[in-house]
Every structure is written in C-alpha cells, then in structure tokens.
Amino acid sequence: PEGAYETAKDHIRMAVAKARELVPLEVQKVKVEPSCLIIGGGIAGMNAALDLANSGYKVYLVEKTPTIGGHMAQLDKTFPTMDCSSCILTPKMSEVSREKNIELLTYSEVVEVSGYIGNFEATILKKPHYVDQVKCNGCGICVDYCPVIVGNEFELGLATRKAIYIPFPQAIPGQYTIDMDHCIKCGICARIDVCEPEAIIFDEEPEYLKVKVGTIIVATGWDLYDPTELKQYGYGRYPNVITGFQMERLLSSFGPVIGKPVRPSDLKEPHSIAFL
C-alpha cells in the first residue's frame, strides 16, 4: 500500500538522520582476568577448553551431567567421513581430564554470574554424587546389589540402569553417582560387604564455588524436540514409534542392541521402517 511505502521511507530518513549525529565510542582499557568459564562439556566446550588451556589460560569447564562428552558420545559415526564417534571423542575427553590448566566441574551448574566484560564472578553449584570419589575403586558391586531399575538417559530410554550408575563405560570422570530422584535409600549399597571402601555418603551436601573469570563461553549444546506434541504420529503411545536419535542408538555398535535395528516392543527385526 502507498501509505506503508511512505512510512518505510520515513523510517529510513530518521535512521540516516540519527546516524549523522553518532559519535565514535570512547575506547576504554580494563584489566581482564586471564581465565575462562566454559558452560557445557560437549565437543564444542571441550575443544574451546583445550585451545584456551594450551594457550596458557586457566579454564573452568562446567558440565551439568556426571560426565563430559555431550551428545557426540551417543553417536556411532560422524558425517561425512563416517569415522567412529567414540574414537574421536574419547581421546579428547582424556586430554581434557589430564590438562593441568583445566578444572573439570562435572555434575555442576552455573547459578549466578555478576560483574562486567573482562571481570566476571560466577557461582557454581557442585551437586553431590553421594559417593566418595577418592575412596571409590569403581568395582561396580554396588550396581549389582542395587534393587532400583530406571530408564537409561544415555540410551534414550531404550535400556535401563540402576539408581547408582556411571553414565556409560567410557565416561570421564568415571565416577559413580547415586540418582536421588529414584534411590529408595534402602542402604544396601552402603553395607560393608557390598562397599568395602565405605565410599557411600548419603548425607553429602552440595557445594558452592565462586570463580573470577575474564570471559564466559556458553557451549550448552542442544536438546531434542519432544515429538509427543505431534499427536498424529503416536510417539509415546506406540512403543515402535521412535525418534531419529533413538534409531541412532539402536544402530550404534555400542548401543543397547549392539547395532541391530529392532522393534523396541519385542526386540524383533522389523519387516519395514518408515522415516518421517
């Protein structure tokens, strides 16, 4: 419409007039803390941490789950070379854990950030594992005795785990964690005949850590869209309707069915597969 065209021209004239009055920003020099906070321990966060650490900077790498690796740890192969995902990822995870300039804070979350460019103060919540990471020898006997069975998040619900668990075999750090959302506090795992090192700490409290950093990198990754909202496809109602990521786990050589495409309902080979 003619009126809209004239309005658009007026907006452009106003923007040009405003630009004529602009003055250069004043250059300011501030002291910058020679350290960095990276939020997210996936492949992006790990690469950034290693680059900064190798350049001599102190890095605080914060990951909300008990292990670094992110979603790449759940993939079987990577495009376009189809290289083994864990073959690429696992050495990098080990390098991060060994790097002296990286302080690895898994099972932790950033709860507050204050300050200004070059001088931030972050408060980090370190959630309790309820397992003494020094005493625990990783024998896994506690897992055998734990009576609680829940869905395995790493396998996207296609397999199960116990209330005390390590997310996956190559997890770094390879520390056991008690999932208090499902633990029934029966105390079996804490018995001396089950945990000889007496590493179970049911009364462990969360810790708060304050760090000063010059920069913050947000590498929090991504989450899958919840297809239960698309009622017409029946996801969540029919067990054999799965997401592409769940299909990835089924086809993975280290997945719940060792790379065989099976129906979750009966673990039998499907006659056909439809991708939507």
Image: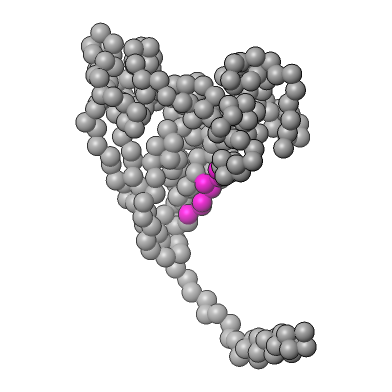
Queried whether the magenta region covers residue 74, the answer comes back as no
Residue 63 in view in this figure: yes
265 or 254: nearer the eye? 265
The x and y percentages for residue 274 are: 74, 30
Drawn side of residue 189 relative to residue 169, left or right: left
User: From what the image shows, is residue 148 above or below residue 106?
Assistant: above
Question: Residue drawn at (69%, 15%), measured in percent from left and top?
Answer: 269
Q: Main secondary structure of the magenta part?
A: loop
Which region of the structure is painted magenta?
Answer: 216-224
User: From what the image shows, is residue 63 above or below residue 130?
Assistant: below
Residue 49 in view in this figure: no
The x and y percentages for residue 257 are: 60, 17
Question: Residue drawn at (33%, 40%), measured in percent from left and top?
Answer: 126
75 or 162: nearer the eye? 162
The x and y percentages for residue 14 are: 65, 89
253 or 84: nearer the eye? 253
Question: Residue drawn at (31%, 26%), measured in percent from left and top?
Answer: 183
Drawn side of residue 219 relative to residue 121, left or right: right
Which quarter of the figure has residue 272? Answer: top right
The x and y percentages for residue 17 are: 65, 91
Which quarter of the figure has residue 184? Answer: top left
Q: How many marks?
A: 0
Figure quadrant of the C terminus: top right
User: From what the image shows, is residue 69 above or below residue 110?
Assistant: above
Question: Residue drawn at (39%, 45%), measured in percent from left and top?
Answer: 109
131 or 209: nearer the eye? 131
Drawn side of residue 31 relative to residue 271, left or right: left
